[in-house]
Image (tube, rainbow, N blue to C red):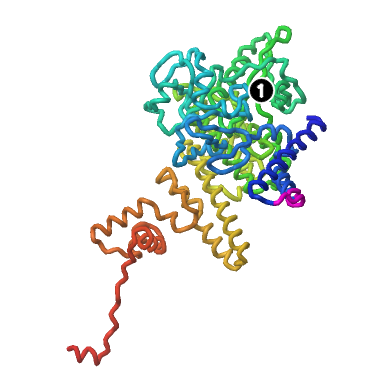
Amino acid sequence: MSGTQQSHTASSSASDILADVKEESDDNNDQDDEDTIRNAVLVKILQLVLEGGLGGNDNENRETHKVRCAACDTYPIRSDRYKCLNCKDLNLCGHCFECRRESKEHKSGHAFAHFKSPGELFGQEVTDDEVTFDKLKKLCASEIHESIVCDGCKLEPIKGLRFKCDTCPNYDLCQKCVDRNATTQTHKPSHPLIVTPRRTIQQIPVEDIQLGDEIGSGAFGSVFKARWLSKNRSVACKVITVPKSNDAERLEKSFLKELAAYAELSGAYILKIYGFTASRHGQNKRYMLVMEYMSRGSLANIIKEKGDNISLRRKLDMARNIASGMRKIHEHRMIHRDIRPDNILVNENYIAKIGDMGIARVVDPLNQHTQIGCQSYMPPEFYEGSYDQKLDIFTFGLTLNELFTSTKHSFQPFVSNKIAFQEKSPIFDDLIARCTAYNPKRRPAAIEIEKTLDLYSAGFDIQTAVKNKYENSGGSAKIDRDLGGAISLLTTNLWIKMIRNTGSINLSHSLGGPRTVRTKANILEMKWRLAQKKRVSSRKLAAEMNISRTSARRILREDLHCFPYKKIKQPKLTDLQKEEEG
């Protein structure tokens, strides 16, 4: 964008702000005092700058949706936006969508329109008013999805709107099955549905892409920073040239496989793909995969350049992003086979996404797998040629250790293919040890890793909340005691134990408080004891239910509205009193 264009954008934004401020002043019947309006305009502009809406990175601003997330209240939504087609004016950011956030009216199993770019759906410009169930039905009424079978009613091909399950692998439904909430053995009502076009990935005219500098290369092609001219957008292009040779079939197959993997998978933490180009250069075929441009490059570059200067919280957020992307890959019965810092891309806002799906493949337990992947990150079973999704868990564990120590592990390729850590991570050492266990069966599932990291993140939020509470109120003397208590209740072993036993944990109340153990099961058990007219004491309940006495007392008093039983001790009699009674 030129300086003139930037100036025009800034002035038009300032004009909008001025109009908004004046409108607010009129609504409040305030006097149109020039100083008041000027100050209000400055505040609004400052807010816009802080939110990245004025100036800053042009490409990042272009990826900003000017709507509010209904779950976390984030404004504006950056990168991926999901608009619910069942609810009125309800939007979710990528994180809340991946977490399956719900409300009283909104359910995770609703149908969504996935906006990869602002104001654009299925590669066409649209307004928000045009994205409704009724209007999309009319728009796509004549579409025929060739070779796509409805997994609900077995209609082939699907006509009109097509919906792809975001949880089940390769699962499609027609409009009628969505209307009647069709379920099968694998597909559940809680699974989100994404409205999908006839051509999942659009073909872009090759002349619409202007290649720039090379920013990376790999076994199957080079990656360039490029410009998508018609969209005026910075993109990354993976270029694969297929010469006439014995290697041609392998290269072409690799490109088509990567295209298929991106068509099957889309999410907040999987690298976005906009489309592809196909052309001829002499006797050679040339393919380009047009993807989102991640301005901060790979995680490997970030670790190398910044290392220990990255905050612990930011590292944790990136680790959560990677775990969430890996969980989605595994939900779709796929193995990435090369999750490592070089294949994790990071954008301007430090959101990490998994890229390089070229060697991802569908899990097939009956087949031996080809040995593709970076050897220094591979687990022992890789060298036997037979592995499953636990390979990704192993490579994620190595990536996690590298992220938190800024040090790569050592690898002995010609001795025993043994991996050893140069430095122990300050946190997550237990999780890293489990992820990199020699026996694949001892490694955790991706969803367990994701939940564990989410709980650590909640722990950070508690520390911040406690600090703010006491620092703002001037009670700094109590902060160490209360913060220590909160952290002690958030030990990793406690959370992992609860996740293993129940598969989930109730986070509806603030962590570290008494309600973390005042679960529905505990309350029902105490209620049953009272109904059986059994003696209930907080000491006995605390011992039997493995909770604190304070929590037992609070369940009795606050949830069951009865006071703990206390035995009244009789005073001891003196010898004289004993003689009188005798």
Image quadrant containing the N terminus: top right
- What percent of the width, then of the height, locates residue 530? 27, 59
Mark 1 secondary-structure assignment: strand
Q: Quadrant of residue 564?
A: bottom left
On the image, numbered disc 1 is attached to which residue? 290
Is 71 positioned to the left or the right of 282 in the image? left
Q: Nearer the viewer, residue 576 or 275?
A: 275
Is 35 colored magenta in this rendering?
Answer: yes
Picture residue at 57% right of the left edge, 43% below the top: 73
In the rendered image, residue 450, in percent from the top left (x then y), is placed at 52, 41
Kindly tell me whether residue 167 is visible in this rendering: yes
Residue positioned 59% across, 22% down in the render: 122
Q: Residue furthest top?
A: 283
Q: Is residue 420 visible?
A: no
Q: Quadrant of the C terminus?
A: bottom left
**Kind of residue at badge 1:** Val
Magenta: predominant secondary structure element?
helix
Residue 529, image x, y percentages: 27, 58
Please state the extent of the stretch shown in magenta in the rendering: 31-38
User: Are there few (<14), some (14-19), or many (20+) residues within 10 Å of tag 1?
Assistant: many
Q: How many marks?
A: 1
Q: Is residue 483 above or below residue 285?
A: below
